[in-house]
Image: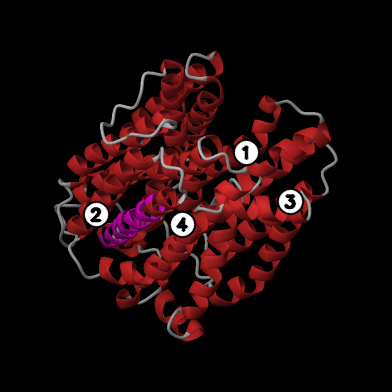
Amino acid sequence: MSSTSTTTERTGSGLGLLAVLMPAILVTVAASDMVNLMLPTIGSEFGASEAELAWVVTGFLLMFSVGIPLYGRVSDRVSLRRLFAFALLTYALGNLICAISSSLVVLVAGRIVTGIGAAAIPVLSIIAVTTLLPPERRGVGIGVVSAGAGVGTAVGPALGGGIGDALSWQALFWIMLVVSLLLLVPALRVLPDETPRGSGRLDLPGGLLLGLGAGLVLFGMTRAQVSGFAEPLSWGSLVVAIAALSLFGLRTVRVDQPFVPPALFTNRVYRTGIVVAFLAMVVNLGGLVFVPLMLVEVNELSPSRGALVMIPAGVVTALVAPWIGRLAGRADARLLVLLGLGLIGLFSLFLSSFTGDSSVAFAGVGILGLSIGFMFVMTTIISAAARELPPEKTGVGLGILQGAQFLGAGTGPAVFGVLLSARQEGGDGAVNPLFDGADGFAYSDVFLAMAAVVVLALVVASRMRPGARTGADVAPVEPPNASSRS
């Protein structure tokens, strides 16, 4: 009996599976930036500098970026139940360390452990939906899981700031600890324990080079957001990252069984989707970071109140996600991606034109439009990739796709942050002629730059050729008996 049929029997229509995956991905994605608004309080308690406090976020993000492609590859060899249980228990352990930490060093160590566990949840959730749900329900499943990630990203800062102000910053980690343990039992029930029949050895050196490169890219971008690209730690990290990724590329074409099979990239839909996912995430995270920051600096709201503008976008996204997922499973993938990018570009221009207005309503509308457009893009790309990838390479393929998406999340705020600082120092007015506000011209230029990135993404996405996977698109990379979930 196949994994899909077994899971269907165990969870009915798949509701039980989604009831576990959505909250799991929501809390782990929210954990990435839920402590942002509490960093000043943590710094005061531990007597830490801003640079030292940055490691509370950076430590988590480094493990997250390194872990995503690794978990995707390992999922082709280890059962989903065991990997998911390991991830939840590791995530719980990390939160426990954070909750009882008595120094900044212990807190950062806890965040690193938390990141190791959290990195598995998004990629394993997508793999679970695409391999365990019947084809007619996969689109909805991908939409629901993507909604969890979107809501977690949108409400993370507001949730963290609200709970931290009402209780304490330690309460954030106690709550995440309890939630992860509560999810463990149902996860063990709905996820299958079948071991995928992967063949050949695992290219661990290649995986380590890929993880090192991805982690250093994120670290360099994070440092650039704080200190600029001229800082040695920023550009030095990026130089070493390029070297590691270059070595990874050389190893990929030279070894017999590389960590990432090159044949995956012979499929135009898949390789185009990776680029579009990266660019779309650059813009999406740019909006999620700089809209609330603009409300704090330009509209003079408190950080916690500024983050509240994200909540309506998170709620609406969660409501429309299943419909978008259903549509992604039936409609032309290229048209849906172009539609989503069009919405992102339109609302980026909207934000660029109205950032100087005293009302926060424009910011709320702008971030809502960005979120819906991004949901169209990512849900469609994931659905298309799941159809195009060979079954035995679903794990590594989706892991690389989500890794590219997450690198975009680190790149966007860093690049736009440098632009914001440069424009604030320049002080010569907004580039967008539609902007007529007295303040916020630098933010107008940031949102205009986001729209320019969308134009590039539209050019790339126009090459996304729809259609079912064929032998010409993806060459066989495993023997026929290596199917991972039959």
- Label 1 – label 2 distance at C-alpha: 31 Å
Of 12 and 352, nearer the camera is 352
Name the residue at 42% across, 50% down. 399
Q: Residue 11: percent from the left, percent from the top?
A: 49, 82
Q: According to the image, label 2 marks what residue?
A: 337
Instruction: Determine crowd level at label 4: few under 14, some 14-19, many 20+ residues with C-alpha closer than 10 A.
Output: many
Q: Earlier in the sequence, mark 3 or mark 1?
A: 1
Under mark 3, the amino acid is: Asp
Say which mark, if any, is on residue 57: 1
Under mark 1, the amino acid is: Val
Under mark 2, the amino acid is: Val
Name the residue at 47% across, 39% down. 290
Task: Look at discs 3 and 2 and give the one toward the viewer.
Answer: 3
What are the residue bounds of the magenta stretch?
366-387
Instruction: Determine crowd level at label 3: few under 14, some 14-19, many 20+ residues with C-alpha closer than 10 A.
Output: some
Task: Look at discs 3 and 4 and give the one toward the viewer.
Answer: 3
Q: Earlier in the sequence, mark 1 or mark 2?
A: 1
Quarter of the C terminus within the rendering? bottom left
Q: Residue 325: percent from the left, percent from the top?
A: 33, 68
- Label 4 – label 1 distance at C-alpha: 19 Å
Q: In this view, does 445 lie above or below 145?
A: above
Q: Is mark 1 on a helix, strand or loop?
A: helix
Q: In this view, does 431 lie above or below 435?
A: above
Instruction: Determine crowd level at label 2: few under 14, some 14-19, many 20+ residues with C-alpha closer than 10 A.
Output: many
